[in-house]
Amino acid sequence: MNFQHVALSVALVLATQTSWAADEAGTVKISKGPVHVERASGRIDAPVGTRIFSSDRVITGADGAVGITLRDNTLLSAGPNSIVDLNKFVFDSTTHAGAIDATVKRGTLSVISGKISKASPESVRFSAPGMSLGVRGTSFVIDAGS
Amino acid sequence: MLLFVAGLASIIYLGLTAQPTSTVVLLPDADGGVGSVEIRSDSSARQSLASPYSNASVTTRGDIVSRVDDAGQVLQRYAQTLSVRPKAPVSFMLLFEFGSAVDIAPAFKPVLNQLLAAIADFPAPQITVIGHTDRVGSQADNDRLSLERAETVRRLLIDAGIQPAIISIAGRGEREPAVPTPDDVAMPENRRVEINLR
């Protein structure tokens, strides 16, 4: 990571905290069985229409499953017994610059990548216990086990 | 002593068997193509996947084991996860007259009807109206013009009864031409507004 990268990261972080802070990262489109979101303000049920924000943790129960569309058209779905942390989501709808950082702590997550992955694939990072992955515009499943 | 032996035995067991921890499975794209993913274990082993249904697991030892599975096995194993994938977003296009953010009405009606029909298929529907320009003029001017075009269409959608809360707008300027051209080339196909429904 050179100086320019650091400067860009700092700029992205500042931009997030100022103009984009209130923007949602995505929205729950399908919700089956027990699905919850944990954030600093507490734990909420997550039916269809629930807005998802950067730093949210999404949790599904034993027979729960959830589908989430992110603002850059990334499509996510988590199967039963899953814990997924959306550590970071930033998206500029003019330039398509942005970042996605998500961790599958437990269970399964399917991903169909969106506009950020196309414009800046180096800023898309998914991880699971023992691994992280870089993505070149595609569809995949991460299985973090139980 | 017994505890020590049991402990030693389990250490040897873990060391020998190298249980998988996390697995990544590459799927084909909806259009039949396939992208790629690169897996990196915490101990810096690397593995790229580029063929459909290939997968890679990181073991408890930190190495990566890969193989290609049968499509049916993969789809069955992850059926519950894949069954809740959100519907793929769809886009509708409107062309604009040169330099104008206003002269859109004749093209609007059929697109509106298609959009209204499609909205019914999307749970918690959201719309992003995205303006585009051709490459005549400066980038800053085109950013502004593309946003004006998007705003014009946003107002038409609201007039047509779509809830303002589900509509956002974006101006892509000249960054995403439908037909690539050199700078300063007038190209009607690039003067457009995309209505993206997700």
Image: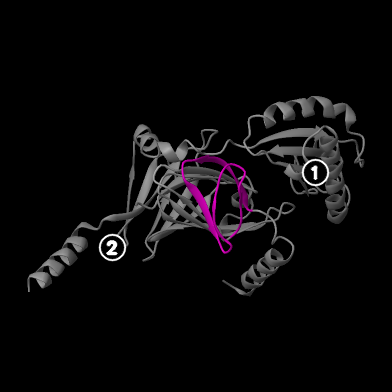
For image coordinates 83% across by 38% down, the residue present is B153
Q: Residue B135 in the image: x percent, y percent? A: 83, 46
For image coordinates 69% across by 32% down, the residue present is B119
Left or right of B6, for residue B52: right
Q: Quadrant where the N terminus of chain B lies?
A: bottom left
Three-letter amino acid code at the position of disc 2 = Arg
Q: Mark 2 points at which residue?
A: B61
Q: Residue B125 in the image: x percent, y percent? A: 67, 38
Start-end of magenta stretch: A25-54
Q: Looking at the image, which is closer to me, A141 or B40?
A: A141
Three-letter amino acid code at the position of disc 1 = His
Q: Which of marks 2 and 1 is nearer the N terminus?
A: 2
Which chain is home to disc 2?
B
Contact (CB < 8 A) between labels 2 and 1?
no
Q: Quadrant where the C terminus of chain B lies?
A: top right
State the mark number for residue B149: none
> Is residue B47 visible to the viewer in this orientation of the structure?
yes
Name the image quarter holding residue B20.
bottom left
For image coordinates 86% across by 52% down, the residue present is B144
Q: Looking at the image, which is closer to me, B174 or A146?
A: A146
Is A32 inside the magenta-drawn segment? yes
